[in-house]
Amino acid sequence: MKPVIALVGRSNVGKSTLFNYLTRTKDALVADRPGLTRDRIYGITRRFDDRYIVIDTGGIEPLEKSDTKESLHHLITSQAWQAVEEADIVFFMVDGSQGLVPQDEYVFAKLRQSSQKVFVLVNKADLEQARQLAGEFFKLGSEAVFEISSRTGKGVGEIFSALSPHQHSLQAPPDHGDPAAIRMAIVGRPNVGKSTLANALLGEERFITSDTPGTTRDSIAVRAERSGEVFELIDTAGVRRRSRVHDMIEKFSVVKTLQAIEAAQVAILMLDGTQEFAEQDARLAGTILDSGRALVVAVNKTDACSEEDYQAIRKGLELKLRFLDFAEQQFISATRKEGITKLMQAVSRAYAAAAIEVNTSTLTRLLESALEKFQPPLVRHQRIRLKYATQIGTCPPTFVIHGNQIARIPGSYKRYLENYFRKKLQLTGTPVQLLFRQPDNPYAGRRSKLTPRQQRTRRRLQKR
């Protein structure tokens, strides 16, 4: 499972800015006023080689005697300390331009009482005043003090380099059981029928089912066999909108669900066919897509759907989940065990597509065929030249296309190539990553412009 990083500190020290930088998103609101972040925000790092789950928190301030448990100040601070309990690593952020203040000493003293590893991040190191005051934070006694800029990312890479030696101690070794088994996570909003589907696949009441949302609060892996295929089934807790998640135990379940997606090879996104698709469904689908996992969409409770409902479901999928057009859609009834076989067949196809390996000659022929059908655009009256393609990874399939002027290839042409490769290789149910690289030697592959006489002279000299 991926380690969890919590960003904590006083208000307005740059936690949300760093969160957005690490996740390459704008999920956390950023403004030059304190108290903007209140609840915890979860994301997955998209920078550097290692992947972590990162939590943004509101500002921690010393509680006043007048603060009640229901006060906003108390609730925000409690959320931050709960994030510390969830985390394996704590990034304690401070404002370098203000120097060491009593509030920082108060928060750090409490952090030292926790069992988590604490890194002190002195933010705003791109300012001259911050660089002059950065030395004050060594008074805290921390062995890990880093000067960074959450706005530009300066110094952040050094932190993750320092984390690498601790990676194995922070991360529990994955127990994949049978290496031939397909690791599969069932994810979705609460009460969509995830545990009911898991029980139907296992043929027994292995997981507790209830009409009460949030019944499942942990991710449980169980081995199952279906139609000759072996699966390692991970039933996960439902993920609700952050504003509706108040129970601390359910907050932990969000982390477990994100970790289950990272550990799986195929994710089944379960939707409730009796309800309108919500924004949370799309956000969860985006998380699966960003993780690079193969995906199958399962619309449950279709036994209670009419023909009009089916049309509304298909319209909703087209409108709200159009970016999942590569994934197969299966209509099932978990309670009646209808459509389960077809669903698992779709899972097998998605896994096979994600694990496909294609040799360079085949990929290059596909590239040449794509170029014949639709040439790249002209750039400054010169045609973009794409020379050959090779595969560098699986799950998801990752292809590299080598050529020149790759920085000028428009997004529409990249999508054309991605769709062409997907169609010709029958990559249904898996994301495809297409990378573009330019040779280090710009003259590599060019024909010699020497005259025949010069070429003979060169060959003669080489023989000597």
Image (cartoon, rainbow, N blue to C red):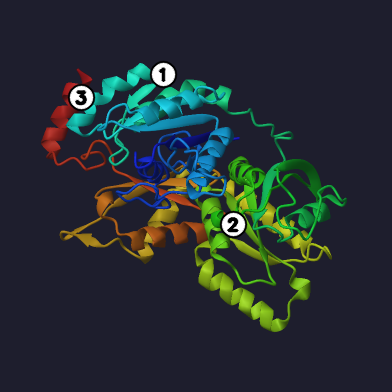
Q: What amino acid type is highlighted by mark number 3?
A: Gln
Using the rendered view, name the quadrant where residue 447 is placed: top left
Q: CA distance from mark 2 to mark 1?
A: 37 Å
Q: CA distance from mark 1 to mark 3?
A: 19 Å
Task: Determine whether label 1 and label 3 are within 8 Å by CB.
Answer: no
Element under label 1?
loop
Q: Does residue 376 sit above or below 37 in this rendering?
A: below
Quadrant in which the C terminus is drawn:
top left
Using the rendered view, name the quadrant where residue 459 is placed: top left
Extreme residue in the front direction: 66
Q: What amino acid type is highlighted by mark number 1?
A: Ser
Q: Which residue is mark 3?
A: 132
Q: Which residue is mark 2?
A: 244
Q: Which residue is mark 1?
A: 142
Residue at point 35%, 44% (across, down): 17
Residue at point 53%, 52% (across, down): 287
Q: CA distance from mark 2 to mark 3?
A: 43 Å
Residue 86 location (% of width, % of height): 58, 36
| Sequence-first disc among 1 and 3 | 3
Q: What amino acid type is highlighted by mark number 2?
A: Arg
Q: Is residue 1 left or right of residue 431?
A: right
Few, some or many residues within 10 Å of mark 1 (<14, 14–19, 20+) = few
Q: Is residue 422 left or right of residue 303?
A: left
Residue 181 location (% of width, % of height): 72, 41
Choose between 67 and 240: the one closer to the eye: 67
Q: Is residue 324 left or right of residue 408?
A: right
